[in-house]
């Protein structure tokens, strides 16, 4: 059996002082697996690995918002859906327009029309 990796210790070695969201991410990986956490966040396994090793060159703020919603319970008020997780908000912002339902249409327009939770470049995964 392979030795267990302590992802919090690994992250501390890479980051020095860990931001709270990175420690929460590492704790979640320790508690389950990197694959499980990547599925829960809707992000790739390699992205999670790069964040934990402080080598991800993408939008760390977008990843932190996703972690805050999915793993830290952060909520936002959506003008269309009401109280939702920050991670749900982030995923909706990244979805392309699709006239398949009224809800999808309302969300697409609300996310791009001055919603206070809207980010200029939502994380796509």
Image (cartoon, rainbow, N blue to C red):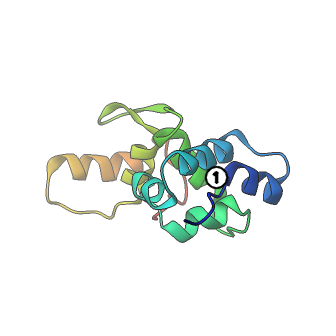
Q: Is disc 1 placed on a helix, strand or loop? A: helix
**From what the image shows, is residue 99 above or below residue 109?**
below
Which sits in the foreground, 5 or 103?
5
Quarter of the image with the N terminus in it? bottom right
Residue at 77 percent of width and 46 percent of height:
18
Residue at 23 percent of width and 52 percent of height:
105
Is 20 placed left or right of 83 in the picture? right
**Image location of residue 50, percent across then percent down:** 65, 67
**From what the image shows, is residue 21 above or below residue 108?**
above
**Image location of residue 123, percent across then percent down:** 50, 60
**Image location of residue 80, percent across then percent down:** 30, 36
Q: How many marks?
A: 1
Is 81 placed left or right of 124 in the picture? left
Structural crowding at the residue carrying mark 1, measured as other residues with C-alpha within 10 Å and reported as few (<14), some (14–19) or many (≥20): few
Is 11 placed left or right of 47 in the picture? right
Which sits in the foreground, 80 or 84?
84
Identify residue for label 1.
Answer: 61
**Image location of residue 27, percent across then percent down:** 60, 44
Task: Return the residue found at the far front.
Answer: 1
Residue at 48 percent of width and 49 percent of height:
32
Residue at 29 percent of width and 35 percent of height:
81
Task: Return the residue found at the far right.
Answer: 16
Is 125 placed left or right of 20 in the picture? left
């Amino acid at each position: 059996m392979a030795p267990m990796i302590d992802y919090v210790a690994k992250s501390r070695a890479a980051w020095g002082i860990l931001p709270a969201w990175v420690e929460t991410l590492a704790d979640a990986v320790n508690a389950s697996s990197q694959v499980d956490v990547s599925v829960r966040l809707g992000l790739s396994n390699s992205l999670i690995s790069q964040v934990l090793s402080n080598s991800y060159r993408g939008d760390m703020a977008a990843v932190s918002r996703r972690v805050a919603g999915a793993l830290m319970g952060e909520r936002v008020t959506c003008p269309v859906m009401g109280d939702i997780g920050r991670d749900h908000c982030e995923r909706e912002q990244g979805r392309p327009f699709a006239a398949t339902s009224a809800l999808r249409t309302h969300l697409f327009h609300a996310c791009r029309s001055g919603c206070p939770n809207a980010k200029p470049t939502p994380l796509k995964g």
